[in-house]
Every structure is written in C-alpha cells, then in structure tokens.
Amino acid sequence: MSPQDLKAEYQALQDEIHYHNYRYHVLNDPLISDPEFDQMLKRLRAIEAEHPEWVTPDSPTQRAGAEPLEAFEKVTHPAPILSLANAFDEQDLRDWHARIARLDDRVLDADFTVEPKLDGLTVVLHYRDGIFVQGATRGNGEVGEDITENLRTINALPLRIPVGSQKIPVPDVLVVRGEVLITKADFEELNRRLTEAGQKTYLNPRNTAAGSLRQLDSRSTAQRPLTLLVYAIVHHEGGEIPATQWETLNYLQALGFPVSEASTHCPTLEDAVRLSMATDPNAFPFEVDGMVIKVNDLGLAEDLGYVGKDPRGAIAYKFPAQEVTTKLNEIGVNVGRTGVITPYAILEPVEIGGVVVKQATLHNFDFIQEKDIRVGDRVLVKRAGEVIPYVIGPIVDVRTGGEQPYSPPKTCPSCGEPIINPEGEVAYYCTNSACPAQLVRNLEHFVSRGAMDIVGLGINTVDQLVQAGLVTDIADLYSLDVPALLKLEGFAQKKAENLVSAIQSSKEQPLARLITGLGIRGVGEVAAQALAERYPDLDALSRATRAEIEAIEGFGPNIADSIVEWFNNEKNQAVLGKLKGRGVWPKAELRQQTGPQPLAGLNFVITGTLPNLSRSEAKNLIEGHGGKVTGSVSGSTDYLLLGEAPGSKLDHAQKRGIPTLSEVDLRQLITDRSA
Ligand code: IVH
C-alpha cells in the first residue's frame, strides 16, 4: 500500500472510530459489537506504530492517558464561569421571575428552558478548528486548572467536532461548559469491584469524579467511569452560535456533544415551575440536585446582568435534600431469616426529603469497622426513592472525643445464644436454629407474595403465633385451627376462619413457590423455578446430588452446596416430613415442551410488577410457549412485558421503538398466535 493510501485509511479509520465511540458513549446506541470496535482500534494502533509522526492529540488512541504531570498549569477562562442563585420552593421561583420582570418587561413574554442541575464537576472545554485542545476546571471562576489530559480520557467527550458526517459549521474557537459525572450505576459497579478486591470504597459519585479529575496521572483517570454532559457556550470566535438556550442545546447535541435528554423547552414560566417541582430527583441515571430554569433568549439573559457571581437570567430550584447529617445515638441489631445479624443505626430524628428518619441501615459489621463509625458520631445519611435510608459514613472533622468505637454483640439479642462470624465471611450468625427471631423471619418469608402468598398473615400475626407457641416451624401453620386462633388478641370468628382457609388453600400453590418458601440460602424465585422444572417433588429434590444441581444452568457450587446442606439437615427433614403429612406436597407441572410453541422465535424482556404473575411465573409462561426471556433490552428484543413501576428497561425499549405488552396482552398474543 502506498503511504498516501495508508494515510487515507488511517484518517478514515479515525473518523469511523470516533463515530462508533459516539454511538456507544453518547447515544448509548452502538451499531457494532465491542470486539469489532476493538479490532478497529487495534488496526489504528498498528498504523500509528508504523507512523508515529501521524499521531495527533485528537486520535482515538489518545484517550488512554498520558505521562504523569508534575502539577496542573493555570488556565484563565475566556469569560467568567458564573454560578447560579438557588430557589427552595415555588415562591422563590415566582419572586425571581417578578424581580427580573421589573428590570426588563420583555421577561413577561419570555420562554424558558428547564434542565437538570447536574451534581458533578464544572469543566470548560476549548475547541480550536473543531479539535479539543484544552480543558479546565472551574477554579475560582476566573482561573481554573488545566486538566486536558484527564478530560481526554472521557469517552463521551468528543475529541473532534462535529462528530460523524454532519456538515455543521463550527466556529474557529468554541469554548463549551459542562459537568463531569459518574452515573449511579457505574458508581455502584465501581464500589462493588473495590469491595470484592478488599479495597476502600468511595463515598459518593461526585467526590469520586472530583478525585478522578485531580489525578496528575491521567492513566489512572482513564480507569474511572467518568462521563460528561454539556449545557452552555462560554465563548466563540468566528462563525455563528445560536441566540437561544434551547437552540444552543440542540446545536451542541448536533455537533456530537452529550446533552441531557431531560432538558425541556417551556413556553411559559408556569410550565417551567410546574415541571421543576414535579421532577423526581431519582428519575435520572446520575445524581441531580435540582432543576435549572433559564431565560431562553440569551440576549435578554445577558442584558439582565449579574448579582455577584449569579446571572439573573437563570435560577436553580434545589430539590429537598436527600443527604443530611445527624447524630448516631445507638447501634441496634436485627436477626434475619437465616440467622444473619445485621446492624442498623438509631438516629437523632431528622427530616430528609420531607420524611422524618429515625433509623438507617449500616449494611453489615464490616462496614462499621471500615468507615470507623462510632456511637455518638455525626453521620451522613441518605434517603432516596424507594430504598431504605442508609448511613454513608461519619463526619470525622466534628468529633468531640466522646464518640465510642463499636464492637459487634457476642450473643443474639433475641435468644441470647452465641453469635459466630465464620472465617472469611462478612456475615455474623445466630447459631440457634430455634431462635424465635429467625423463626419469625422464616415464616414471613414463607407466607410472602413471591412464596406461598398466604393473604392475611402479616408480620404482627406471625409474631403473635410464635409468641403464643402455636407455631414452631413453617409446617405448624397447616395445623392451625379456628379455636387456636381465637385465643389470640384481635381474632374473631370470621378473621380466624379466613386465615385458616387462606393457609389451607396455599397447599395448591405450585412446587416452585414452596421451594422458594423454604428459604434455602441462595434459592430465590428464579432458582426455585429451575429446580421445580427439574425435580417432580421435594422427595426427588432431597435426593439430588451436588454434581447434579451444579449441572443445571445458572447454578454454581455455592448454591448447590447450600441446597444439599439444607436437605441433609435433620431438622429440615423433620419439617419436610410434617409438610408431607399435612398434604403440603405439590407435584411439579412439567413444562409443555411438546405442545404448541406459539411464541417460538420471539424474545421478551420483563420489567415492573405484573398484576397476577410473579417474575418467574411470567418467564415460565413465555418459555412454556416457546419464547425466550432475557435480562436486558437489545436490538433483538421483540416485546417488553410491562408491569407497575417499571425500571430503566422501559426507557431503553421506548428509545428503540420496541412494543410493550401488558400481562393481558401477553395472553392474547399467545391465543392469537396459537390460532
Ligand atoms: S448554568 C450562566 N446549567 O451548578 C450559566 N449550571 O450551583 C450558569 N450546573 O456552577 C450555570 N447543571 O456548574 C447550569 N444545567 C446546568 C447545570 C449547571 C449543573 C452547575 C454549574 C453551576 C452550579 C451552580
């Protein structure tokens, strides 16, 4: 190949890699597989090895990080990097609007944008002739630090604009403002890996992103899952830029920058206020601490001027805090179903996002030790969405010296028997299998919706039954009768009859539900379903060997061990004997593999809670009719089976235009395709 041809190939390959990088990291919609991408990058590296003189800083290979720096250089921003005034409620927003309308009556007819207030690190990105040449931190707003090499490692940051084949003119100099972030999912994954490696975990995505950008060695920055969203043009020379904020966002997006999908153009203040107040802080894949309302007309915004460092033309509506600090008064412990003892924090009551929080989880005893959490500490507590409030860590700087280090209890708070912490395990256990606290948890699990689904048997009743000595294991539920229940507080004839009847009807539940209900460590609904497909009843499962179970898809050695151990346990055998004697002995309905396969060739993904079917029952229904169920939405997904409170799978499906089905639709589909 002639050098000219090679150079042409090299340049075309660069463009292609930039484009596929953009499809993957900005659009989240890759066109090619990871190995194909890696193959291209490999070829590019090979050419660069032959012609190092061709390599420019905007080559895709330059994202891996460069030689460590001694220190960061200072960068003077081409225009001040301003801050934002805050609003905490609707009235603040209306006051802001009234204030700026008094200054300029064009505000009365103004339109607005509403954008998420990204809780990351502000960065200022310089492009010269469309090439990323410099990136800086905000610093004091006038002068920041040059973190170009660190920013170059961020895959979502375009090294060259416009990305792809669009012919959009770019000013000679374009300086863009944005935020560097870590998504919540990437943050959790990062901490999960650190925990696995026995290393210290990070406090939150923001601090982690900040620390990553401060690395003098950009090769370590390249290892962190940083991403970027941009929202403003700070400066330009030559060419033209849009006159409104909404057009700016669209322009930046068209150039190939990552721009938040959650930004909205609002024709009136009313719309902007309503939208800002109605936005759920937890609805974003990254941390957002409020919504920014901006006057859309950038000329008007400029004319409105500044108060100190805050432009008048924009305001940040701050969400009620999700993280607060409070005093840790005491550490309590809970006994779980398998005897696992877990600590929780008893807090000085504190309001977080409109709810008074008195308790928060401390995860496990190792966590307390790792974070050096002491009784009496001020701790950072987070409450977000549906999750249980949790302690993030202590505020070490405000310690007074009176804080008490904590050690795990030696005996079970429920039964007083010794607690053990097996070598190499995080968990602490109560070893007494007759521990009443364990029994209560076991029963709760047995009767729960995903297991035997016995309606009318809530935690209080379970507690009463155990306290009264009426129930010493799950099988005892089936010998409860009306006269026995009538002795309990709050039980009248009707209620007692209903409960006995609910318990008796649960004998008809399918085998998978009974297996789930046994509470074998590691065996949830999905594993139980797989076992019920393999073994016709609990006798057969009792005889299963480790090797046999390990041969089932999705079963590893730990879960196989746990199952075999459970069935070898004498007490469990006694419980099984009682269950059988009382007629709680379902036989598996074998899968209709020979029947019609109306869903053959179709791929399904399930999200949310379905009205009648559990996850595994839905999976079984689909697979029983020849369909396939996968865990995540992809190009080959045909339908999304959609229940209440769906997850992000719904967004993915909608983006790809994949149709959704309700449970009823699914049954209809089966009927239609069977005809
Ligand atoms: S606009 C004149 N828009 O929040 C423009 N800022 O607390 C002023 N921030 O310093 C900023 N998301 O770093 C703007 N969508 C967004 C933002 C945003 C996050 C940051 C920004 C600012 C800080 C103010």
Image (tube, rainbow, N blue to C red):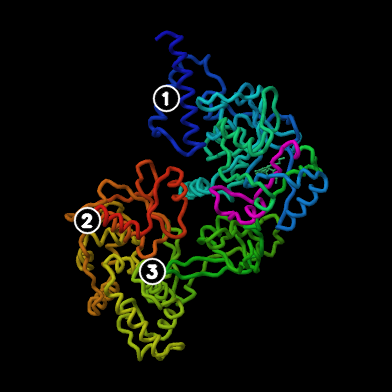
Residue 210: which quarter of the image? top right
Look at label 1 and name its amino acid. Lys
Answer with the quadrant where ligand 1 appears in the image. Answer: top right
**Rendered location of residue 425, percent (x, y):** 43, 58
Q: Is residue 625 above or below residue 148?
A: below
Q: Amino acid at mark 3?
A: Arg
Label 1 – label 3 distance at C-alpha: 52 Å
Q: Which residues are magenta?
A: 272-301
On the image, the x and y values in percent for residue 352 come to 63, 62
Residue drawn at x 44%, y 72% as measured from the top left: 418
Q: Which residue is mark 3?
A: 449
- 675 vs 107, left or right, is left
Q: Count residues near mark 1 (Cα–Cα under 10 Å), then give few for <14, some for 14-19, many for 20+.
A: few
Left or right of 557? Residue 540 is left
Badge 1 vs badge 3, beta-carbon distance below 8 Å: no
Dot 3: what SS? loop
Q: Is residue 292 magenta?
A: yes
In the image, residue 661 above or below residue 235: below
Residue 143 in the magenta stretch? The answer is: no
Mark closer to the observer (3, 2)? 3
Q: Quadrant of the N terminus?
A: top left
The answer for how far apart the CA atoms under marks 3 and 2 are is 29 Å
Q: Which residue is mark 1?
A: 42
Residue behind mark 2: 548
**Which residue sits furthest front?**
109
Q: Is residue 532 left or right of residue 287?
A: left
- Of residue 243 and residue 229, the one placed in the foreground of this image is 243
Q: Is residue 73 above or below residue 374?
A: above
On the question of residue 213 being in view, the answer is no
Identify which amino acid the numbered label 2 is placed on. Answer: Glu
Sequence-wise, the earlier of marks 1 and 2 is: 1
- Does ligand 1 reach within 8 Å of label 1's beta carbon? no
